[in-house]
Structure formats: structure tokens, C-alpha cells
Amino acid sequence: MNSETTVNEEKTAKSWSMVWGLIMFLCGLLAIALPLATSIGIVLVLAWLILLSAVAHLVFAFHSGSIGGILWKLLLALFYGVIGFYMLAHPILGVATVTIVLAIFLFCEGVVEIAFYFHIRSATNAVWVLFDGIVTLILGYLIWAQWPSNLDWVLGTLIGISLMFSGISRFMLSRAFPRLPLS
């Protein structure tokens, strides 16, 4: 009876993993179909998270043991609060900011991956790290070069592509689990 329960639990987990993969894929398609709405949604969620961080800094400021600690946390709370409220009030400018930060991040990541390749170049398949670094560097540059004319599609499209590939990989991984007996 115990092994039967385990088999049923594994079937259920596999089914839910496949369903979740399909949902992620469909959300990715939706994000690509509505890239500006997705970008604004991302900025709004980020703004609320920043505001939550501001509240946390404010609360924990009074638990600091020193005046310097209190002042530092109060300044951070103020900074986070201003940024969070600004992003909520001006989501398109938030999208512009997040897009340029993404371009800088991808450019820097590409440089680091290329440098890392030279550290591991003798390893098997290290050329994939170089390839990833070059593609990431180019992607960062392309986002930067087209900014701000790309604001209406970049974030939503990239998130959509990421969700689609995550959904596909989850679905395919679930299918790769050992075939379980039906009864």
C-alpha cells in the first residue's frame, strides 16, 4: 500500500509539473503578445517590493543599536520610499529605467562571461561560455543602442521568451520522468 501511495504521489507531481509548464508557456505567449502591459506590470510589482523594503528599513531602523545605524536605515527607507512611489506614479519612466539597467547588466554579464571563458578555456565545452558571453554582450549592446525607442517591447518580450523556455523545459523534464504504471 505504501508503494501504491508513492506511485500515485509521483503521478500527481508529474501531472502538476506538466500543467505548470504549460501555464508558464501560455503566460510567456501572453507576455510577448502584450509586451508593454507586461513591462508596466513588472515595474509596478518592483515598485511595491521597493516600498515594502522601505517599510522594513523604517521598522528595523529603531532596532539599531546606534544613532549611525538608525540614521542609515532611515535614509535607506526614505530613498526606497521615494523610488517606489516614483515608479508607481510614473510607470513608463520606471520601464525606461529598468530597461537601461537591464542593458547595462547584460553588457556587464557578457564581459564577465567572456573573461571567465579565458579562465576555463581548457575545460570541455568551455566554448559555450564564450558563446553565451558574446550573445549576452551583443544583447546588452542592442538594448542600449535602441533605448529609449525599444521601451514598449523589450522587457515584456524578454520576460515572455524566458517564461516560454522555462515552461517548455519544465514540461519536457516532467515527460522525461520514468514512465509510471497506470495502475
Image (cartoon, grey):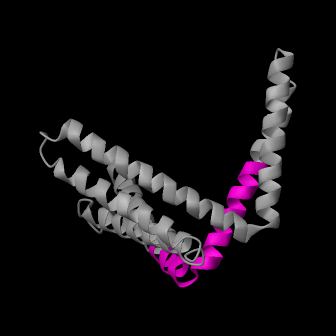
From the viewer's side, name the closer residue of 86 and 149: 149
Q: Indicate whether 63 appears above or below 163.
A: above
Q: Main secondary structure of the magenta part?
A: helix
Q: Quadrant of residue 118?
A: top left
Magenta stretch in the rendered image? 25-51
Residue at 72%, 64% in the rendered image: 44
Q: State yes or no: residue 50 in magenta.
A: yes
As drawn, 7 above or below 124: below
Picture coordinates of residue 24, whole percent (x, y): 48, 70
Residue 87 in percent (x, y) is at 76, 61
Q: Residue 135 at what x, y percent from top left?
A: 32, 61
Quadrant position of residue 47: bottom right
Residue 144: image location, x then y, percent: 50, 65
Q: Can residue 19 be seen in the rendering of this structure? A: no
Instruction: Pick out the residue farthest to the front.
Output: 145
71 displayed left or right of 129: right
The answer to if 127 sits in the magenta stretch is no
Residue at 61% over, 73% down = 38
Image quadrant holding the C terminus, namely: bottom left
Image point (53%, 84%), residue name: 33
Confirm whether residue 121 shows in the render: yes
